Image (cartoon, rainbow, N blue to C red):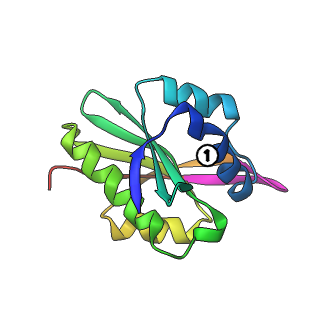
Amino acid sequence: MLIRDMTPSDVAAVFAIDCQTNDFPWTQSLFEQAVASTKKTSVIEKQGEILGFSIVSYVVGEAELLNICIAKNQQGKKLGNTLLEHVIAQAKESENHELYLEVRAGNAVALALYEKHDFNEIGCRKDYYPMKGGREDAILMARSLLF
């Protein structure tokens, strides 16, 4: 298992994972822009196959997890946990004090993962995410990186 920086040549695979996993994925151009920007973009791979990715923004001592995703056929293997631990470690090494994220209110698996890693709910954005047949709330979460 290897976690490394995402490159432009990874974008097609990352986009495919997002499309297979999310009803409302990012566009391919958003991934291209993330790789070309100052955002911290990573992939987790095994034997050259990309199994998941993360995208994090750093701004003045604060990190925000913008997207994290594991391929559908790789879920349940603790890869999300491994990738999130990597995100947290990198954010600490880059001298960030807080790590923020938002998650769909109905994503119980992700909520449990974030709570396991000391994230706390700090707010809610009503009807933030589109979903089939309506909209879904976003739960805002944060954790300190000082411990």
Question: Is 31 positioned to the left or the right of 65 in the image?
Answer: right
Is residue 133 on the magenta stretch? yes
- In front: 111, or 83? 83
Residue at 43%, 68% (x, y): give it: 113
Q: Residues within 10 Å of mark 1 (few under 14, many from 20)?
A: many
Q: Position of residue 20 (x, y in %)?
A: 73, 56
Question: Is 60 positioned to the left or the right of 19 in the image?
Answer: left
Q: Is residue 14 above or below residue 33?
A: below
- In front: 99, or 139? 99
Residue at 35%, 50% (x, y): give it: 87
Q: Number of numbered discs present?
A: 1
Question: Is 110 positioned to the left or the right of 31 in the image?
Answer: left
Screen quadrant of the C terminus: bottom left
Q: Residue furthest right?
A: 133
Q: Position of residue 44 (x, y in %)?
A: 46, 55
For the question of whether residue 98 can be seen, the reply is yes
Question: Is 66 positioned to the left or the right of 135 in the image?
Answer: left
Q: Which residue is mark 1?
A: 14
Residue at 35%, 71% (x, y): give it: 116
**Magenta stretch mostly in which secondary structure?**
strand
Q: Position of residue 3 (x, y in %)?
A: 39, 53
Q: Is residue 94 above or below residue 106?
A: above
For the question of whether residue 121 can be seen, the reply is no
Q: Could you tell me the amino acid type at mark 1?
A: Val
Screen quadrant of the N terminus: bottom left
Residue at 33%, 54% (x, y): give it: 86
For the magenta stretch, what is the residue range? Answer: 130-138
Question: Circle 1 sits in a helix, a strand or a loop, which is it?
Answer: helix
- In front: 147, or 56? 56
